[in-house]
Amino acid sequence: MPLLIVLYDPEENNRNSRIDNYPMDHEERHVHYWAMRQGNPFEGLDVLWIDRNSDLGTGSPIFQNIIHEVYTNIDHMYIWIDNDIFEDDIDGWVTDTSGAFGPNELQMNYLRNLTVDDVFLAVEMTEHAVWSTNAFQRFGRIVQCVTNNIPVIYSVPVDAYRGHLWGRGTYNEGQQFWWNRNNEELYDILEELIRNNEEITAETVTDRCSFDIPNCPGDFGTIIYQPFSQWARPFLLSLWDTLETPVSFSLLPTTYSTFPDQYGASGCQLENLFHTIEVAIQYAQNTILETTYNTMWNSLKEDLQENVGGSWTSSRRIDLYDQYCTLNGFPNTTFHAYDSERDPYDISQHFSLRSRNMGVATRANSIYAISGGDEIQRAANILGHLSELSQEYGSPAFELNTTLPALLANRNSILAHRLTGHISANYNVITHSNKNCFMPYLDYQFCRNDISDSNRPNGGSNSPYGRRHILVAFMQDIPSSEYYSNRYWQNTYSRTHYIWNQTADILMFSDGIFLGKLWWPEGVNQLADVPQIGV
Amino acid sequence: MRILCYDLETNGFHPSILQFAFIGFDSKKQERIQLIEYVNPGEALDRRGAEVHGISSVQLAGMEPFDFYKSDIMSLLQGSVLIGFNNHTFDDPKLANQLGITIDELNETLWCNIDIMRLCQRNNINGNLESVTERFSLQNPMPHNAHTDVGVTLRLLHRLLAEENIELPEEIGISKVDFMEMIEQCVDIEDEDYLIIERESAEMYTSLVSDDRVQFGPHAGKTMDELRELDKFLWRQLSD
């Protein structure tokens, strides 16, 4: 009997309030767990719900092959197994936390051998609107999947209402005030709506609530409407076109920070998401034609593109991007401001993406034009810029140690992406990955070859060697020996940056500048072997 | 004589134990000892701690509480030479707390209690477990896992004694050679996972393609024909 494996994010089960953990084992799991709500695509299937980090008591993660590549917590990954290896043990739904799943050695080895190639779909689910750092930092997870050719659906609210002084879903004082009010009345209402498969809207909740919800008196400020982010769709389109793997949104209803987290949509409001998952499962089952599967994805892409509009890409994708920046004297900016009177020569229209200003403390990204008549001069110029950047952040100056590969030295510009470190107690680049979202966007959308390919209007060449710029991962305050130690990669923040570090052309640390993996000679397995270009 | 090396992973700086590992050898019974378990702390996990040890609450959900193992651990401790790294400061108080006894009562249970970190400090070898092991060409294949922490601690002690960097405390009451043989019964000293092995250096290429093979990056060693299938753009660049 075939089996569907759902690898879930362990945080799904960390529900300490209201239901005392483990929603997927709860007697009302079709209420408490989004994937089990009415209309879900898993009914009638044999399904193993298993924590993606599970070690099943062996001391090492069972899905090591997968989480080595997709190492942060995307909510779901799906694997379809056609053979009968689990036939006698799994009938219907089985969850790893219920104690009902105890694989034998053969089954364990089978699970251990699964790789990202076996994953046919990933789903990221959040009730946080796509304007907050919390929603943006999820893009890193999505890039990890798409880079590994796993199609992705990002399920996120279409827009949001939030308290002026507080966000959405962060369990802060303002939210808890509402969520706990009248002995958790809102929880009761939302659960009842989900139980009855009725829509969760401001009206349906207000009708049932004994107090007024919309206004936030006192310390909690007023309510603010927040539309969908203008960056989100173009970013997914650029991922899709560049990495040639489907990735799209499935929109959830409007979200309200007064409504308790995890209860943002009834099953009837998840129909589109459930349908997409169902089609992907059927394709994995081999019960539908490839054209049906492709039609579904094409339709999602058309919706994305239509919403973004043709002018977005045609007016922004400038193959002379590097030249404009050079003519501007190359300010430390990363992107053009959007405006009907857009003038790329106007420095005031440049801004550093997701940074409050261009000051040293808050700036995440920096760009430099490369000059020089030959490779030796250009290598010296590159090192000069990076040395200057290093000193700007209180690190030492560097001198050229060895020449650069010609393909690298002859590129047009440097995009330096600051991934770590802080020099202000109030600002820390590494707390959320949102600052790290836009440099890859710039990389994929604007700064690669094949930019004029009309078949892929949102992205450039899939090859990282197709860059027209040098991508530098600036690891401020991190010495090279720390970066290359096992211990460094045990840290969650380090892992969220892995996708950028691994694809960088150059890595800059507090004690040296090194070539990235893309340029290492064969056989490098220790720091001493990594070519150091700046000392 | 029984030696028993141990380590704990705890819930941040809370006293609750999430994982323990006891590895040792009983010379009288000629028996290797290994008791390694994850423990359900019955409380929410400290987020910062979880980032260090990587243990999740889901992982611990099906595990027994520490109390379940209390009597087994007390039996093991009885008359043992207890060994740890920084255990006098970090692990011993937490272990005693969870066993419901005082530090003095813990030490009265033991033959003696050795903290390798303190032995090192007396000989001007300073640093945490990771830095000291690295200095002696050892590594922990899974840092912040109690099992491998004990593995690397035992190997470190063996190396420190073999290279005469520290003296074996007299209170143990056996010779250094006998003691090292007991460690060899606990763990495979030659296990390459724990050794930092000097390897031949990789040489920087002088040309991006040599003998029709790519010399750099993830495609190093591939022929140009193979590269054409893997990365057409790079293939075109290198062909030019």
Image (cartoon, coloured by chain):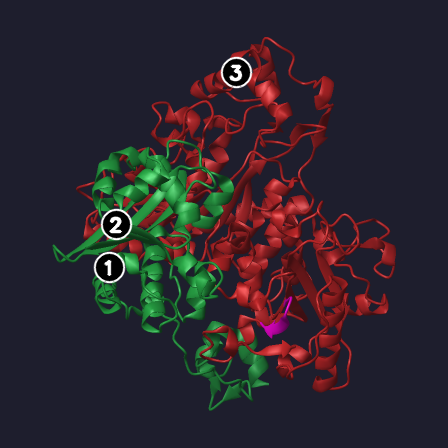
Residue positioned most to the left: B29
Q: Distance of mark 1 from mark 2, alpha carbons? A: 10 Å
The residue labelled by disc 2 is B111
Q: Are marks 1 and 2 in contact (CB under 8 Å)?
A: yes
* Left or right: A339, with A256 as reference point: right
Indicate the amino acid at tag 2: Trp
Indicate the amino acid at tag 1: Gly
The residue labelled by disc 3 is A184
Indicate the amino acid at tag 3: Glu
Residue B47: x and y in percent read: 50, 40
Q: Nearer the viewer, residue A102 or B154?
A: B154
Q: Quarter of the image containing the N terminus of chain B? A: bottom left
* Residue B4 visible within the image: yes
Let me know if residue A168 is in the magenta part: no
Q: Is residue A63 above or below residue A48?
A: below
- Local crowd at mark 3 within 10 Å, few (<14), some, or many (≥20)? some
Q: Distance of mark 3 from mark 2, alpha carbons? A: 56 Å
Give the chain ID for the green colour.
Answer: B
User: Residue at the location (79% across, 50% down)?
Assistant: A357
- Local crowd at mark 1 within 10 Å, few (<14), some, or many (≥20)? few
Host chain of mark 1 = B
* Residue A257 visible within the image: no
Predominant secondary structure, magenta span: strand
What is the number of the mark on residue B173?
1
User: Magenta segment range?
Assistant: A509-515
Secondary element under disc 3, as helix, strand or loop, is helix
Give the chain ID for the red colour.
Answer: A
Q: Work out whether mark 1 precedes mark 2 in sequence or the reverse, and give the earlier one.
A: 2
Q: Nearer the viewer, residue A368 or A300?
A: A368
Q: Distance of mark 3 from mark 1, alpha carbons? A: 65 Å
